[in-house]
């Protein structure tokens, strides 16, 4: 009894002093940012430059993947452009399945939509040309505006680091 | 050397485009006499006829109208974008184009940027105390060009707008000069004597 009382008095003295006491911080589970940040692994998982950098580097070390004017102040149509972008990304990644080295870049200049893609040389050039023509024709027919697909091919994916 | 040649070629193609438009609409879009800027442009074209591109067709399709061209005291071009570096390079391009065309640039300044912030919940369900903040930055750049004619303005603006980078928006506002109407030129009290005295 006496021991416990003295220990309680000791603890209270420590908390009042503050310097010697180590307090316990308790926070809810959802506090750390996890969006678009790859977790550290063994060291064998390759990452491109785009995937490796977290999103707060956009504008500083990263560029924009989708360039249009609807997010500027006083401009409208942001939601429509976003929906179009999502559809175009799914369409292109499905057409060139497993052949995309990086995320595609969508640029809008006036009426024209320019899709810039980097492909890996998995198929023969004739098949690539056919797929490029097919994508351009289908998307320009769907969206009723000129579409241009600008393609660059690589041997294999450009790896920035391994995690 | 390549840049002024490319610009002159652009001018030829633009003149062709404008003269093509003037065929459709009978309004004064073509080159008009009596304005210095248009004459300078005209006199530059024959000097380049020695090179490969054809100027004869351009000359035959230029229309001359009697209507006087509109005069602009100030043309203000404001460009906005998300990336400041893109606006810097666009400013260099626009300044160079204006210098080549002989347009006086009054001033080029950068209005302060606008940041639009929004705060949303970080989680799909509960965790009200944890939020994420996003922001959208809009940078501006403003060119003020002074004392231009309507033709020059159209050519310059068309050239500038065709070469706008993606993700950059432009707003143009012009201040036109008009001739003072005849019925205001002379004060009214000189024609008629004052009949009734003002006051009670």
Image (spheres, helix red, strand yellow):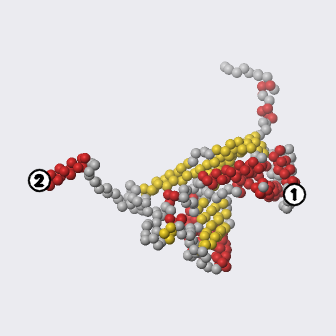
Q: Decide which of A138, B169 is in the foreground and name it.
A: B169
Place residue A158 in its image quadrant. bottom right
Residue A1, percent across and down? 11, 55
Q: Which residue is mark 1?
A: B49
Residue name at image x 46 percent, y 68 percent: A163
Residue A102 visible here = yes
In front here: A18 or B111? A18
Residue at horizontal 77 percent and vertical 50 percent from the top: B100
Rendered image: mark on residue A2? 2
- Which of the 4 quarters of the picture holds residue A124? bottom right
Tell me which chain the residue with mark 1 is part of: B
Quarter of the image where the N terminus of chain B is located = bottom right
Query: What x and y, as percent, mark residue B75?
Result: 71, 45
Residue under the image location 46 percent in, 66 percent down:
A38
Mark 2 and mark 1: Cα distance apart in space: 111 Å
The reply to the same-chain question for discs 2 and 1 is no
Q: Is residue B28 left or right of residue A89?
A: right
Q: Looking at the image, which is closer to me, A69 or A16?
A: A16
Observer able to see residue B81: no
Does dot 1 land on a helix, a strand or a loop?
A: loop
Which one is nearer the viewer's eye here, A91 or B37? Answer: B37
User: How many numbered markers are drawn?
Assistant: 2
């Amino acid at each position: 009894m006496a021991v416990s009382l003295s220990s309680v008095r000791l603890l209270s003295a420590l908390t009042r002093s503050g310097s010697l006491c180590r307090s316990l911080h308790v926070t809810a589970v959802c506090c750390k940012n996890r969006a678009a940040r790859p977790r550290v692994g063994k060291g064998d998982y390759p990452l491109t430059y785009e995937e490796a950098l977290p999103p707060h580097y956009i504008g500083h070390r990263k560029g924009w993947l989708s360039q249009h004017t609807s997010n500027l102040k006083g401009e409208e149509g942001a939601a429509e452009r976003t929906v179009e972008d999502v559809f175009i990304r799914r369409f292109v990644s499905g057409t060139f399945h497993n052949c995309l080295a990086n995320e595609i870049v969508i640029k809008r200049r006036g009426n024209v939509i320019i899709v810039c893609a980097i492909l890996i040389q998995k198929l023969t050039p004739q098949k690539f040309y056919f797929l490029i023509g097919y994508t351009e024709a289908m998307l320009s027919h769907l969206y009723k505006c000129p579409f241009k697909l600008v393609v660059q091919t690589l041997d294999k994916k450009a790896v920035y680091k391994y995690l | 050397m390549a840049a002024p040649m490319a610009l002159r070629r652009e001018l030829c193609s633009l003149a062709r485009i404008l003269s093509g438009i003037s065929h459709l609409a009978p309004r004064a879009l073509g080159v008009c006499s009596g304005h210095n800027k248009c004459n300078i442009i005209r006199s530059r074209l024959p000097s380049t006829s020695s090179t490969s591109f054809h100027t004869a067709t351009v000359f035959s399709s230029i229309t001359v109208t009697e209507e006087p061209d509109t005069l602009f005291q100030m043309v203000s071009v404001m460009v906005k974008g998300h990336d400041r570096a893109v606006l810097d390079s666009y400013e260099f391009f626009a300044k160079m184009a204006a210098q080549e065309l002989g347009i006086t640039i009054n001033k080029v300044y950068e209005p302060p940027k606008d940041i639009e912030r929004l705060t949303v919940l970080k989680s799909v369900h509960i965790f009200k105390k944890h939020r994420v903040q996003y922001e959208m930055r809009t940078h501006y750049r403003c060119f003020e060009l002074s004392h231009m004619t309507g033709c020059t303005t159209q050519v310059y603006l068309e050239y500038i707008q065709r070469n706008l980078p993606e993700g950059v928006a432009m707003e143009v506002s012009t201040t036109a000069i008009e001739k003072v109407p005849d019925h205001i030129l002379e004060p009214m009290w000189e024609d008629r004597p004052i009949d009734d005295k003002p006051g009670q």
